[in-house]
Image (tube, helix red, strand yellow):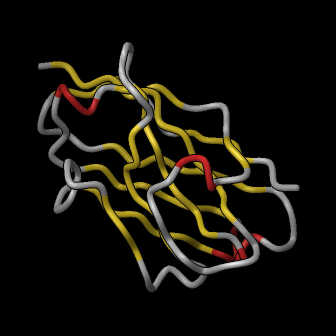
Amino acid sequence: QVQLVESGGGLVQAGGSLRLSCAASGRTFSSYVMGWFRQAPGKEREFVAGTGWSGGNTLYGDSVKGRFTISRANAKNTVYLQMNSLKPEDTAVYYCAAKGPYSDYVNDRAHEYDFWGQGTQVTVSS
């Protein structure tokens, strides 16, 4: 069982930056693929980024490539999402998710992620 708690959301102007954090419980954090998803009102949940066990393999959604960076600190049981050049369309609730620990395969399929945080709101004003 993994419990996830996100933090770092807030209100920012377009062009600004935010860094989200997700703290995980449990001693096997390094064996989980970690992902970030987001959901805006009236829209489906969207994959943002994912990282494998060591952080060496990453995957990004097309809408955030080149602007967002996912990273993890296994010693701290934490995964991060650095968001730069934010746009109003990035406004959403951002969720941290964990998949595994059976595979290091990073993908964008939400239904394959086993554990989810409660979400943190990110609002980008124009």
Give the image quarter of residue 9.
top left
The image shows residue 69 at horizontal and vertical percentages of 33, 63
Q: Nearer the viewer, residue 120 or 11?
A: 120
Identify the residue at image location x=66%, y=62%. 99
Identify the residue at image location x=67%, y=40%. 117
Give the image quarter of residue 28.
bottom right
Residue 52 position (above or below residue 116): below
Image quarter in which the C terminus is found: top left
The image shows residue 123 at horizontal and vertical percentages of 32, 23
Give the image quarter of residue 11.
top left
Residue extending farthest top: 42
Image quarter in which the N terminus is found: bottom right
Q: As drawn, is 2 to the left or to the right of 40? A: right
The image shows residue 45 at horizontal and vertical percentages of 44, 34
Identify the residue at image location x=24%, y=25%. 124
Q: As drawn, is 1 to the left or to the right of 84? A: right
Identify the residue at image location x=74%, y=56%. 24
Residue 86 position (above or below residue 112): above
Number of disc labels = 0
Q: As drawn, is 11 to the left or to the right of 96? A: left
Q: As drawn, is 9 to the left or to the right of 4? A: left
Residue 81 position (above or below residue 58): above
The image shows residue 100 at horizontal and vertical percentages of 72, 68
Residue 121 position (above or below residue 52): above
